[in-house]
Image (spheres, grey):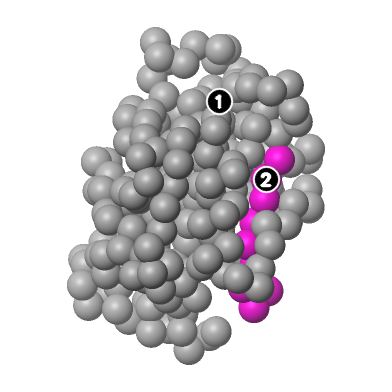
Amino acid sequence: MIMNRLLFLFFLLTITSNAQDIAILKYDGGGDWYANPTALPNLIQYSNASIHTKIEEKPATVEASSIDVFNYPIIFMTGHGNVFFNEDTVENLRNYLTSGGFMHISDNYGLDQYIRREMKKVFPKLDFQEIPYNHPIYNQSSIFKNGLPKIHEHDNKPAQGFGLFYDGELVCFYDYESDLSDGWEDEMIHNNSPENREKALKMGANIIEYAFKN
């Protein structure tokens, strides 16, 4: 695992001048991978200001089956509907995540059944595990003593943060019944409350901070 991470970092350094970049994952299946268009740019702006990252302000879009995913330490995925990973995508994402890449999936409502099915193709032997509140992802620059914050009501269920752990390392963080990315959107789009928006941005920055450190 250590060697894979070193190779991944070497690859990053040889193909891009800035290893602190994030891309939006474009996937097949009909789901709206492009949902919440203001969300990630706002999170990037917040992270650059609050935790001093140097992320390109306009996130790229990368095909799930493309080798270009290796350009980005973090890939972000969201949507409401169906997701489909073909064999090339499955292999590509598996190689990416086992070589030091990190994936954040934000359920924008209606994604759950599809993403669980498709990520099982990527890691047949792994299941999403609920992440304990004492995990470092909740304890970066911001502390979330009660775990993932609830940002947007859907089915009146508690917010849960799930993860896929490969060789003991968290490689994929999945926010469920929270809708973090809704909270990152422009205030005029998602105006639930300034407090919730701040929580969403802080948690998003924590995810970025954790991913860059590990």
Quick one: label 1 or label 2, which is nearer the N terminus? 2
x then y, percent, for residue 113 = 59, 44
Vertical position of residue 144 compared to residue 125: above or below: above
From the image, tell me which residue sits under label 1.
198
**Nearest to the observer: residue 43 or residue 101:** 101
From the image, tell me which residue sits under label 2.
161
Displayed quadrant of residue 68: bottom left
User: Is disc 1 placed on a helix, strand or loop?
Assistant: helix
Q: Amino acid at mark 1?
A: Glu
In the image: residue 34, left or right of residue 148 = left
x then y, percent, for residue 40 = 38, 37
User: Dominant secondary structure of the magenta stretch?
Assistant: strand
Q: What residue occupies the far bottom of the structure in this picture?
A: 3
Disc 2: CA contacts within 10 A as few (<14), some (14-19) or many (>=20):
many
User: Is disc 2 placed on a helix, strand or loop?
Assistant: strand
x then y, percent, for residue 29 = 37, 46
Q: Which mark is residue 118?
A: none
Magenta-highlighted residues: 160-168
Vertical position of residue 59 compared to residue 19: above or below: above
x then y, percent, for residue 162 = 67, 50
Disc 1: CA contacts within 10 A as few (<14), some (14-19) or many (>=20):
some
Residue 84 can be seen in this image: yes
Q: What residue is drawn where x is 46% and y is 16%?
A: 190
Q: What residue is drawn where x is 34% and y is 49%?
A: 28
Q: Amino acid at mark 2?
A: Gly
In the image: residue 130, left or right of residue 152 = right
Q: What residue is drawn where x is 46% and y is 36%?
A: 81
Q: Quadrant of the N terminus?
A: bottom right
- Indicate yes or no whether the magenta region holds residue 167: yes
Residue 49 can be seen in this image: no
